[in-house]
Image (spheres, helix red, strand yellow):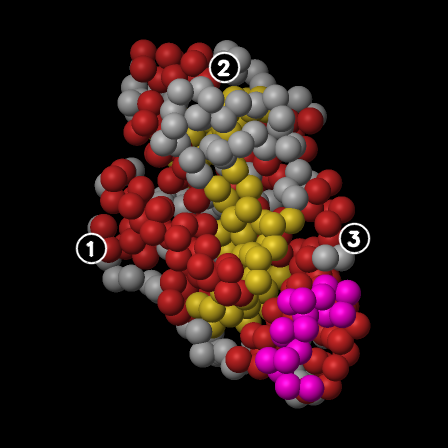
Amino acid sequence: MNRRRLLGLLAASPALGASLTHGAHAQLADWPAHNITIVVPFPPGGQADLAARPIADALQRVLHRAVLVENRGGAGGKIGNAYVARAEPDGYTLLCTLSSLAVLPEADRLFGRPVAYEVGDLIPVARILADPTVLAVAAASPWRTLDDFIADARRAPGTIPYGSSGSYGTLHIAMEMFAAEADIKLLHVPYSGAGPALNALIGGNIQALASAPGVLKPQADAGAIRILANWGAERAPSFPEVKTFRELGYPNVEFYIWAGLFAPRATSEDVVDRLRVEMKVAMADPAIIRIFEGAGSPPAWQDAPEFAAFVEADSARLIEAVRKIGKVD
């Protein structure tokens, strides 16, 4: 069957897509010939890691090859993103990354540094998750509401430490967007990823953190942290009682942490199409859906064309936010 015809049928019928997957295998018998690696450009415990591991398991089952997750953290995700952008485009090195993908090259330009990679060096394969960021503080903190937090920040500018996944990473931009709108100054403490930053919050080394609901929900449910606000346009299903920044009087504070799968730019169309087919099947798998929903991050699958358009639009918005924020510590 013609590959274009196959993809058209898959788009028209998810059930048919599942039944024709074996046919797709037959047309690409030479790939995969060995193990595949999904690079997560952060340490374990963050949103990209949460997205990558169930997907790796699902792809392993259908591709009949080991699909390994490799954490290459550092520089807010820039190190891992650049590693895959420069990888051999043979389909064996993939990237599961976050919305900071477009922010980091812009930050390099802002500071006059060599640009480590460009977004165009990577091909969007599929979106996996797309969650609004939420603001967490330690349960032992004095802040019960966002107004409490802002009032203290105004009384003592630059003294409330908050964590991030690295300078100009996803969590950093979300907090600086909020701080600029609320006219407050906070103390930025960068970590190598959301997991270490969350540990620092629980351990009392920082006092606030912006992150994805799925990353924060277990600790919130355990009573270790308190959620004060939500960067989304609507309330998060996992924290329905938490108001959005819009509801709290900050209409321009909106930020989402999406996670998606990418391949190096020159990866063959056949391999990318095969990955698209298998990702569609994986994201419809009830077991995968249960894993993500149980973690507080419902699936938000988009196929490559829609995801590419989404990345372009979201990147433009975030780049504009970086330019507005300017140089920050």
Q: Which residue is mark 2?
A: 145
Q: Position of residue 132 (x, y in %)?
A: 52, 38
Residue 9 included in the magenta stretch of the image: yes
Q: Which residue is mark 3?
A: 287
What is the residue that sits farthest to the left in this orientation?
112
Q: Is residue 298 visible?
A: yes
Q: Secondary structure at mark 3?
A: helix
Q: Identify the residue shown where x is 25% and y is 39%.
A: 324
Q: Classify residue 1 by image quadrant.
A: bottom right
Query: Toward the viewer: 124 or 20?
Result: 20
Most frequent secondary structure within the magenta stretch: helix
- Sequence-wise first label, 3 or 2: 2
Q: Amino acid at mark 1?
A: Gly
For label 3, count other residues whose C-alpha is less than 10 Å away and answer few (under 14), some (14-19) or many (20+). few
Please give left or right for residue 252 compared with residue 297 in the image.
Answer: left
Give the label, 1 or 2, closer to the camera.
Answer: 2
Q: Identify the residue shown where x is 30% and y is 19%.
A: 157
Q: Give the magenta range.
A: 1-17
Calculate the distance from the C-alpha at mark 3 to the C-alpha at mark 1.
Answer: 46 Å
Q: Secondary structure at mark 2?
A: loop
Q: Identify the residue shown where x is 59% and y is 80%.
A: 4
For label 2, count other residues whose C-alpha is less than 10 Å away and answer few (under 14), some (14-19) or many (20+). few
Q: Position of residue 287 (x, y in %)?
A: 78, 53
Q: Amino acid at mark 2?
A: Thr
- Sequence-wise first label, 3 or 1: 1
Calculate the distance from the C-alpha at mark 3 to the C-alpha at mark 2.
Answer: 36 Å
Q: Which residue is mark 1?
A: 112
Residue 211 to residue 248: above or below:
below
Please give left or right for residue 19 compared with residue 133 in the image.
Answer: right
